[in-house]
Amino acid sequence: MTDLLDILANPSFWVAVLRIATPLILGTLGVLLCERAGVLNLGIEGIMVAGAFTGWLAVFAGAPLWAGVGVAALTGMAFGLLHAFLTVGLALSQHVSGLGITLLATALSYFGYRVSFPKVNTPPTIAPFAPMEWLPVPILNAQTALTLLALLLVPAIAWVLYRTPLGLAVRMVGENPQAAESQGVSVAATRTGAIVAGSALMGVAGSFLTLSAFNAFFFNMVNGRGWICVALVVFASWRPGKALLGALLFAFFDALQLRLQQSGDAVLPYQIYLMLPYLLSILALVLVARKASYPQALMKPYRKGER
Amino acid sequence: MRLERRHESSRTALVLAPIGAIVFTMAISALLVLWAGAPVGRTYALLLQGGFGSVFAWSETLTRAIPLILTGLAATVAFKARLFNIGAEGQLFAGALAAVAVGGMHGGTGFELSPWLLFPLMMLAAAVAGALLLLGPALMKNKLGVDEVVTTLLINFIVLLGVSALLDGPMKDPSAMGWPQSVSLQSDLELGKLVAQTRVHTGLLWAVSLAVMVWAIFKYTVLGFDIRAVGANARAAVFAGVPVTRTVVMVALLSGALAGLAGAIEVAGRTSYVTLDMSPGYGYTGIAIAMLAGLHPLGVIAAGVFVAGVLVGADTMSRAVGVPTYIADVIVAASLVAVLVATLLTQYRVRMK
């Protein structure tokens, strides 16, 4: 018990929480944008891998760090465009298209890594983002600028969604595409835009792993974080503020799990602690399922003139 | 751009669509071969040769195809009813563990059974383990509206961690020199070889028979009709008097059991014990195979052999010309996307305006 208090009283614990939460915040916002427009994007897991890889590769090749983030965003956009073409243009199953993109993006990234570094055993490193020590805010000043970006994007996206005509259009095509179309909103264009923007965020979420949290690209480094984001969006009932809360809560338990594991008097096999985040996600899904207010048109393809 | 439904799609087009999509994929993937700095023609020739070019190549391909056909069937059954089971990987490991628990753990405890009794018990345990793992997500989807994609995916991580804990602890083989691997099956429970001097085992017959069985269920039984009805439109199925919950439960049990059997058959036919790397993602590849086959159970056999051939061939090719083996995964994933588009084009016409 005193152990637990010790852990919670230590600022380094909260630094870890915010660090673990960052890719989840970015990824969850990305999924949220897509789903608000009525499109499930299970490509996230692969898009994060691809963003982690291309962002890192750009920096390794000599680009500045922010250009690496930009490259990761562009990578995300490219896969988002493919997902939009398949699900909005051709009205294919959103589940299947997303899974296909995850497989494709992951395979392409691993292939690209192996082609670029054929005989390397220890992954080559870069100099990642430095902590913002100039910031007079404790805990936040141990983070990098990407964390600040993620935190700022939460109110920004909430503002766009709820306070601008663009956000209204996005929410309308996710709730009632027929009505949106009759108001002169192009369902296809709005959905495509939302998917591309959301996928860009997923790419950036991936690049956080290689450009900030670590300094190299590893296989399996995304390790299910994308799927957790999909669960977090349901937990957040599609609201940016709650998405931030969910990501922080999740990161809290993940960081706690790590500390308990290290504290030495762990009674259970370490794998049990590692299971906690996944169990927690499922529990969260079950708990909010009953009152979850899905965007009404989520996963329903829209074809003009067809009902 | 808009889509117009075609009045009829010809059978030829339906068969040619996946083939055309695969040819298209190979053409696009040629760019990756060029990027890796290898000659395209030779690389593809080596890939084909490595997968299908000799008796040995065929034996390796068919060995690899066995778990892929089974996980492909698992995905086919579930997807047909729009139950998106992405958990075949976890179900496969659950089945493998159950098989070893029944067929390997009882030695020395005086619990001796004839292999004639023990073998069916082992397979049953594997099927039940896989089935139970999918039952929860299926019921959560049906009763609570929890998206089954996310739950089945997350359960994969939980199962793999559980397997890892068991292989470190209670199920660890004490004679494995510290490696996290389970105890072995009793040797009289292992599947026989189909061809001497190769690794192909009689699990191939299991996989093919199960594919035929699933095909017969789809075609000739009430359950098959119900599955298609639920998959086409769950709400309409309720109105038509189809027992939706019961159908979903049956689908979950069948799909999970097939994935569980994939694990047991891998253990009984190939590895004889469970390790964490016994499956390089067969559960996920099974999804691509089901889609490549257009959710047709007999097509799953062909798609499974094709994908297995590409994976096996890529190993040989990579050793010879140094193109990373990940190109096989790219080809499988890109074919999946291309086949989806090609199949759509057999049903719809794209009009630009």
Image (cartoon, coloured by chain):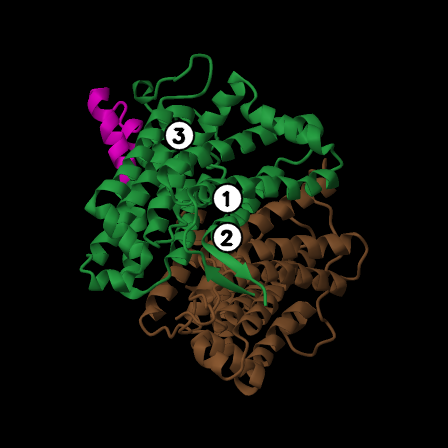
Chain colours: A brown, B green
Q: Which residues are magenta?
A: B101-128
Q: Nearer the viewer, residue B38 or B135?
A: B38
CB within 8 Å, label 2 to label 3: no
Q: What amino acid is at disc 3?
A: Glu
Residue found at the very far right of the displayed protein? A62
Q: Amino acid at mark 1?
A: Ala
- Indicate the secondary structure of the residue bearing disc 3: helix
Q: Nearer the viewer, mark 3 or mark 1?
A: 1
Q: Which residue is mark 2?
A: B345
Residue drawn at x 49%, y 79% is: A181
The image position of residue A260, as x and y in percent, is 47, 56
- Residues at marks 3 and 1 touching, judged by CB atoms closer than 8 Å: no
Q: Residue furthest bottom?
A: A163
Badge 1 element? helix
Same chain for the residues under marks 3 and 1 in the image: yes
**Which residue matches tag 1?**
B17
For the residues bearing labels 1 and 2, Cβ distance under 8 angstroms: yes
Marks 1 & 2 on one chain? yes
Look at the picture and state if A74 lies above or below A153: above
Point out the residue furthest to the top here: B196
The residue to which callout 3 is attached is B266
**Circle 2 crowding by C-alpha within 10 Å: few under 14, some 14–19, many from 20:** many
Q: Residues within 10 Å of mark 3 (few under 14, many from 20)?
A: many
The chain ID associated with circle 1 is B
